[in-house]
Image: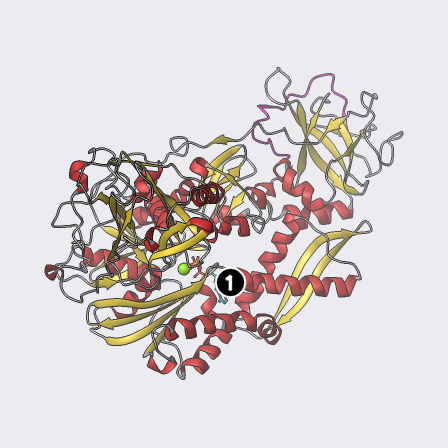
Amino acid sequence: MTESNQAAVGLVVKLPFATPEEFLAKYGGNITRGGIYLRARAVKPPGTAVTLDLRLAGGERIIYASAVVHFVTGQGGQGVVGMGLRFLNVDPQTRRFLDSAVVTLPHAQSDTPPVPNGVGPADYTVPPTAPPVATVSPAPAAGAPAGGAPAAGTPGRAPAQAAPAAPAGPVMMTDEALGLTTEEPKRTGPVIGIDLGTTNSCAALVRNGRPGVLPSREGHNTVPSIIAVNTRGKLVVGHPAKGQMLTNPRQTVYGAKRLVGRPYASPVVEHIKDRFHYEIIPGANGDAGVKLGDRVYTLQQISALILREVREVAQNQLGHLVSRAVVTVPAYYNDNQRQAVREAGKLAGLYVERILNEPTAAALAYGYGRKLNQRVLVYDLGGGTFDASVLELSDNVYEVISTGGDTFLGGLDFDNAIVAYLLEEFQKKTGRPFQGDRVAMQRINDAAERAKCALSERSEMRVHVAFVTMIDDKPYDLDVTLTRQKLIELTEGLVDRTVRVCEEVLKTKGLGPKDVDEVILVGGQSRFPLVHEKITRFFGKPPSKGVHPDEAVALGAALLAHSLGQLEGVVLIDVLPMAIGVGLPGGRFKPVLERNLSLPSTKSYTVATHRDDQTELELTVLQGDSDKAADNEFLGTIKLTGLPRKPRGGVQVAITFEVNNESLLKVTARETSTGREVTSTFNTRATPEVVKAKLSQLEAEGAHAPAAHAGAVATGPAAPVRAPATNGAPSTATNAPAAAPKHTPARGTTQAPPPVHPVPAVAATAPKQKGFMGWLKGLFGRA
Ligand SMILES: Nc1ncnc2c1ncn2[C@@H]1O[C@H](COP(=O)(O)OP(=O)(O)OP(=O)(O)O)[C@@H](O)[C@H]1O
Ligand SMILES: [Mg+2]
């Protein structure tokens, strides 16, 4: 292309965005360092010189440049009508804007304008009649207005419409479209251990008797648990997804671990949905879902994409197929969440041999093969949550005796405390409150987190975010020096909260800090020196140096995976992290299985009909520690129909709650008075609102409270027996079954954990395919 001194076409575009951040968030895919793509009703042919004056909704100028039409799109009636403008000369403010903001867009390093996804093919052909390109100074062409909307159709000023194409309505993303596996994975080959973390995920394997993490080809030990649709519409997972988080937060999903397996209407989702930058909306079956582009993803799909990435890292490292894994989950995960992780594993092509609690995994990493006889406390402060668990290790037996935590306390809260301080300092310096959108906030968050990590090693750190906002048309930086002392002041309360949780989990077992032999710190945030100080002070001794805070959980999972193939496997005894029980009239919650109950455990009680000729009985099953039903997580309802017609109290139904050693729940019901076959139907998943409505309906009908009924018989939970599997419960890792997935009966008798109270064989009398003996989860329509 030649360049001459011909006058350029003036192009004034007023954007529908209020801030540069908003512009970048919505339009980042259309800009590079070297150019911009604009939709337009009429385009100028390639080679046309243009003076571009791009302004925000309020009239502030954001880009002022001389440019040339580099290509056009949509000319053959295909795709979107628009043009790519290549910058020739930009004014200093524009250069600053492009350098500081665009530099973080991975696609935007190019010297030419981008061809955004979906606009159709770019045509670079310069027509013979095209006006020659002008080298112009960055001043508007004669007659170009200083601001305002382009005058449509005015010769010499091509009107441009700078809004991205309007998205179509959301559609559910299919597993097939994501290339996820829908078949049962093969159970051959090595079993890897996977730590599926809120922030980072990690794979490990025991090789030559030693556990080690499996690094990626690029040398990373962990994969960021992040997926995104990038500005070109491509799905990216792990490091590339993290790389675009700053500039495209709306399309970047992180923290999925906090959402997976939760109904959209659950209190937790309600609490966190506005804290995340991406869109959380109702998905399949009433579960929370995530909107990316115009598609709705299930959280199982999101988790599966992360697991698949981890699996690929492992396969690349090992050079062969990997299709089996032990996957860790937080101790407090409820039944829905565990099942959802299992499903995610399957979608990722992994047979989940075992779901393992993270603190138990960390304890395994600490004690495996050392024949210890100790009581340890695992302190796990990760990205999103805090967990404290007390375990007793006795040779190869790992028994959790108490567990507790805070699902809203993690590294993120430390970052938030820093961000609040930085914004205060910004206001002090500029005299104005900080005003910025998601992108600006994400950049500040990111800088805060980096400073926080650095302050674990050093005592002072400059936090500098260039051109973070505009005040009175002028760009402003955020520039604050943060000291470790200040960080301690800001976050001491958070660390104190973790210590209080430690105190509580000990106290519930009548223990004190001196009764703990070792404290094991895991989770990235436990690297904060104040954590070490406070733990040392509280326990009267420094924490163990025996485990790596980022790798311990994955290594522990690998060790358990390894032990699955051994005759002398480890014995894991866990506790129930949260009570499981039934909803009562008036919205109350009656625990049937109490928190901290040793697993596996079974508890039965009997309910009787409360009306003459009553043929149906319905129970709502919930999990949580609140005495209000609506505050707990809804697991499902169990409805028995076809009861024999008898006078009130004449029909009794024994309900058995059975939780296996992976905290997976099975509910069995048996009609006791006649032993007659009972047909059961189970509701599909409902929201807490539906549950509440049901409970009040029951109340209106004067339904009885199951456990409180005169005829109710409660049998105590079975005491756990610390003995080899041959003696019965608990099962060893060598024979511990993976919990049976949806509609799958427990595997062969040699593998199934012996129920502590033998469960009468209702299944034999119930219809084979959908008898109510199935795992409760399988009964709620999970795909
Ligand atoms: N050196 C460090 N100092 C302080 N905090 C750190 C350091 N390194 C990482 N972190 C913080 O640790 C957190 C991530 O920890 P980790 O990777 O253990 O979490 P996770 O396992 O993904 O989360 P979770 O266990 O809650 O699922 C982040 O908040 C990160 O900022
Ligand atoms: Mg973790």
Judged from this view, the residue extending furthest toward the right is 143
> In front here: 702 or 319?
702
Which residue: 43% across, 50% down?
Answer: 633
Picture quadrant where residue 768 is located: top left
Identify the image quadrant of the C terminus: top left
Q: Where is 288 relative to 126, above or below? A: below
Identify the image quadrant of the N terminus: top right
Does the stretch in magenta take in 86?
A: no
> In front here: 692 or 644?
644
Instruction: Decide: few, some or many residues near mark 1? Use Cα within 10 Å; few <14, some 14-19, many ≥20.
Output: many
What kind of residue is marked 1? Gly
Which region of the structure is painted magenta? 113-132
Mark 1 vs ligand 1: CB under 8 Å?
yes
x, y percent for residue 484: 58, 74
Does the stretch in magenta take in 123?
A: yes
Q: Is 185 positioned to the left or the right of 524 in the image? A: left
Q: Where is 464 relative to 130, above or below? A: below
Viewer can see residue 215:
no
> In front here: 344 or 453?
344
Picture quadrant where residue 519 is located: bottom left
Q: Where is 154 relative to 319, above or below? A: above
Viewer can see residue 453:
yes
x, y percent for residue 445: 60, 57
Predominant SS along the magenta part: loop
**Disc 1: which residue:** 411
